[in-house]
Amino acid sequence: MSTQIEKKIVTRFAPSPTGFIHVGGVRTALYAWALARKNEGKFILRIEDTDKAREVEGSIAHIIESLKWLGIEWDEGIDIGGPNAPYVQSQRLSHYKKYANILIEKGLAYPDPYTEDEVKVFRKKAEEEKRAFLYREHRPESFGVWDGTKPLRLKVPVVKSYTWNDDVRGELSAGEEALDDFILIKSDGYPTYNFAHIIDDLEMGVTHIVRADEFIASVPKYLSLYDALEITPPIFVTLPPILGEEGTKKLGKRDGAKDILDYREEGFLPEAMLNFLVLMGWNPGGEKEIFSKEEFIELFDISHIHKAGAMFNEEKLLWINKEHIRKQSKEIQSQSVKPFMKDYPDDLLNRLLPTVIDRISNYGQLNSIEPIEFRFFINTPKLDVEKILWKDSSKEEALSHLQAVKEILSKADFLSSESIKESIMPYAESNGKGNVLWPLRMSLSGQEKSVDPFTICYVLGRDEAINRIDSACSVLDS
């Protein structure tokens, strides 16, 4: 992190309301928020809605809901207000006009004199000459009065190379070709992002800009505007890209990046999602991978942000989510499982709960797993002789083993599945485990693959387990 920071750290997250927010945007918010929290600073939530053509209704509410689900709180901004209100750019037009007029007075902004067709001619000529098109090469010698009907452009104060420091990337630089007379305010009266975010950051006292690497190419333009306004730039913190699972391309909405709230609907825990995103470009060192929100804040430091891209791995997300489920109290686990298993008696579900938790990586998986793996606990299996028999064993052999196990169970300790296993295994080992345990499993579950028969006995309870063995014996004896 940059040293000798005199101001209180202020960071911001400033998304555009152009649809759902995905992991890339949330990760940016997460790191900006953690930087402020670690340093007892301030985190602002701002909405950049100046591109009205791309705005999607409901997006602002969606952004707020997404951040609140993950436990990312803001100190001022949209939804809660603050001393720098308003926090929606379309409500701050007078602020941008104020600074636009300052630039005009300094002779550093001018109304665009050209039509779109004229600009196309300039671009075409540059292409034919195999050089980059630069608007400043066509800058008029004298400027008319800006009345708002034409776009307002910055007049680059000094055409020069720039070198700047990024707290993650280190020293970066760009040549004169990176500078151009970009639009400050469009003909519709709305500012461009390139102009508006700089004014907002200035007025809101933002000290650190945490954002994606796609903005690096535009930093020279921002620096030229900082120079024009005689503003000291904030500290730049550029995050590594999040790559798709193949690791070759940046993950975006067009490449399958999901709405962050889709993960909530799928049964992922917010603390697990936050933990997963924490590790998408940051690690404090060591082997530890499971972090609480508080641990992350305590350990967070810009120096531990990676430069290289982080690959999105849903298997890793499932593993992290499973670890967080395991850390939950039994009461919370039970409350989370119950909506998926309403038909199960409470006492049975209480005994079954550890097995359920062991089988899932998120609660939403119970929608598909429960009917297959657990339904037999409340629905007595339908049996036939062929199902019950183990390989080439006879009905008489299977019947004899089941009757022996029934006798063992009638005297066994039912305090746990392990105590039941200790009672049955000596008999199974002396008579062939398959010969004993296969018919027992089928009698209890009717399934070739299920949890082990000792756990089934424990969950069902002594009486129901013996009843099911009796039913199997009746089938074999018929």
Image (cartoon, rainbow, N blue to C red):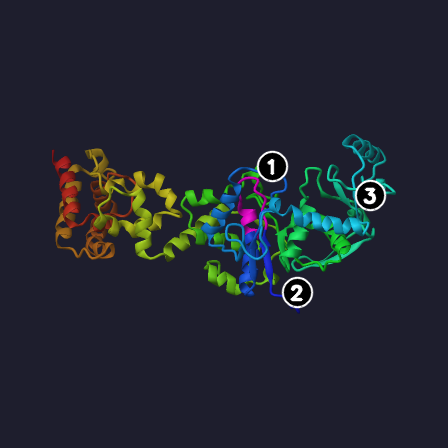
User: Which tag, 2 or 1, sits closer to the chain's start?
Assistant: 2
The one nearer the camera, 386 or 348, is 348
For the residues labelled 2 and 1, say whether their Cβ atoms are less than 8 Å apart.
no
Q: Which residue is mark 1?
A: 54
Image: 54 above or below 361:
above
Residue depicted at 51% across the width and 65% down the height: 298
| Quarter containing the N terminus | bottom right
How many dots with numbers?
A: 3
- Other-residue count near label 2 (Cα within 10 Å), few / some / many at <14 / 14–19 / ≥20: few
How far across and down, in percent of the image, does residue 403 sit?
13, 45
- Other-residue count near label 3 (Cα within 10 Å), few / some / many at <14 / 14–19 / ≥20: some
Residue depicted at 65% across the width and 67% down the height: 5
Whole-number angstrom distance, CA of label 2 to CA of label 1: 36 Å
Q: Which residue is mark 2?
A: 2
How far across and down, in percent of the image, does residue 411 sit?
13, 55
Image: 22 above or below 327:
above
Residue 131 seen from this side? yes
At mark 3, the secondary structure is helix
Residue 136: assigned label: 3
Whole-number angstrom distance, CA of label 3 to CA of label 2: 34 Å
How far across and down, in percent of the image, does residue 193 sit?
67, 45
Q: Quadrant of residue 190?
A: top right
Q: Amino acid at mark 3?
A: Arg
Image: 394 above or below 312:
above
For the residues labelled 3 and 2, say whether their Cβ atoms are less than 8 Å apart.
no
Residue depicted at 20% across the width and 33% down the height: 384
User: Which tag, 3 or 1, sits closer to the chain's start?
Assistant: 1
| Quarter containing the C terminus | top left
